[in-house]
Amino acid sequence: MGSIFKRGRIWYIDITVEGKRLRKPVGTSKKVASLALADLEVKVARQQFDLDVPDGQLADLFEAYLGYSDTNNAPSTTLRYRQVIQNFVLFLRLHHSHISKVSELSLPTIEGYKRFRKSINPRTIELPDDFEYKVARNTKLASPKTINYELKTLKSIFRWGKKHGFCHTNPCEDVTLFKIQDAKTPRFLSRNECSQLLDYSSPKYYPVFYTFLNTGLRLGELINLQWGDINLKRRILTVRKKEDWKPKTGEREIPLNDGMIGLLRRMKPPRATLRDYIFTHEDGRKMGPKVRKALISTAVEADIPDLTKVHSLRHTFASQLVMSGIDLPTVQRLLGHSDIQTTMIYAHLAPEHLLDAVQKLEIS
């Protein structure tokens, strides 16, 4: 009549009653799930079972979602989700300690969380002795942009919870996000600054910065690049998922220019395998956060101001394309943006190109 199954670290009951299928999370114990299923089957047989809506424990939902994220997302993504959950659990513990189920959350509670994150730095709070999370050293007062990210993350978690039987409502569904009025124009390098950066780059990081500037890769995409992702004959670089990592917006192909072809041919070891990473440290480990540190020190030495983020090199790739007359949909495809609105931040760089497009549409 019914069965149990495991997804992530959580055991579920799967049972059909009067033609209606119910999947219900039980917890992390297989034995408990088996007992709960047996109990439900007895109630069904005695017609004592009511198909009530799912009303899961917040702790079970968060644990299951992190298990799902561990399997399907990069470790850094799961870490960000864990930090969001930590902040939310801390807020509930301090201000709504009676809340343990999703159904007990409400829109006013979520609005209270917004105020909490905007006005209180978690590092200034004296944590309860039995609090299960630790506040990261770099935690600070949240900006409106950060709070919006956390609200969107919580909304996604509760949406996932509805899909997997943890709850029947999403308390974040109607929450209002902060309006971001201090959005900054992306920092991108001029052609001269690109040359300066490369001229001052060390032999170790020159290929890294050169690749960023000529492909528009994200940091995660570059450090997870393997020789099997490169087809020198077709002149194509493929951003594809790995066993322990997947691209932010799916797989895509990026054409390689002559400079990139030459660089990769010089870099490729004679006995390189398809699974070998391209950009590694001397000991063979793939690169990581130290890329940003190297970029900052190189920028200082090259006297390039305000270059503190690796993502600025991706902005440079996109900006130079647009200023060269490449249309925005093509830039969107090369960058792997899922929404053209993200690419529109570069539109102001191509007024002449947009005017030319309108001129071609002249109707008389």
Image (cartoon, rainbow, N blue to C red):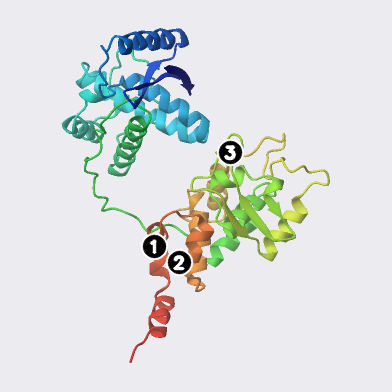
Q: Are marks 1 and 2 in contact (CB under 8 Å)?
A: yes
Residue bearing the label numbered 1:
344
Secondary structure at numbered mark 2: helix
Category of crowding for the residue at label 3, using alpha-carbon neighbours closer than 10 angstroms: few (below 14), some (14–19), many (at least 20): some
Residues 168 and 36: in front is: 36
Category of crowding for the residue at label 2, using alpha-carbon neighbours closer than 10 angstroms: few (below 14), some (14–19), many (at least 20): many
Q: What is the x, y in percent for residue 286? A: 65, 38
Residue bearing the label numbered 3:
288
Residue bearing the label numbered 2:
328
Secondary structure at numbered mark 1: helix
Kind of residue at badge 3: Gly
Of the residues under marks 1 and 2, which one precedes in the sequence? 2
Query: In this picture, is 171 found above or below 208?
Result: above
Secondary structure at numbered mark 3: loop
Q: Position of 197 compared to 328: left or right?
A: right
**Which one is in front in this view, the residue at disc 1 or the one at disc 3?**
1
Q: What is the x, y in percent for residue 98? A: 20, 16
Residue 9 visible to the viewer = no
Q: Which mark is residue 187?
A: none
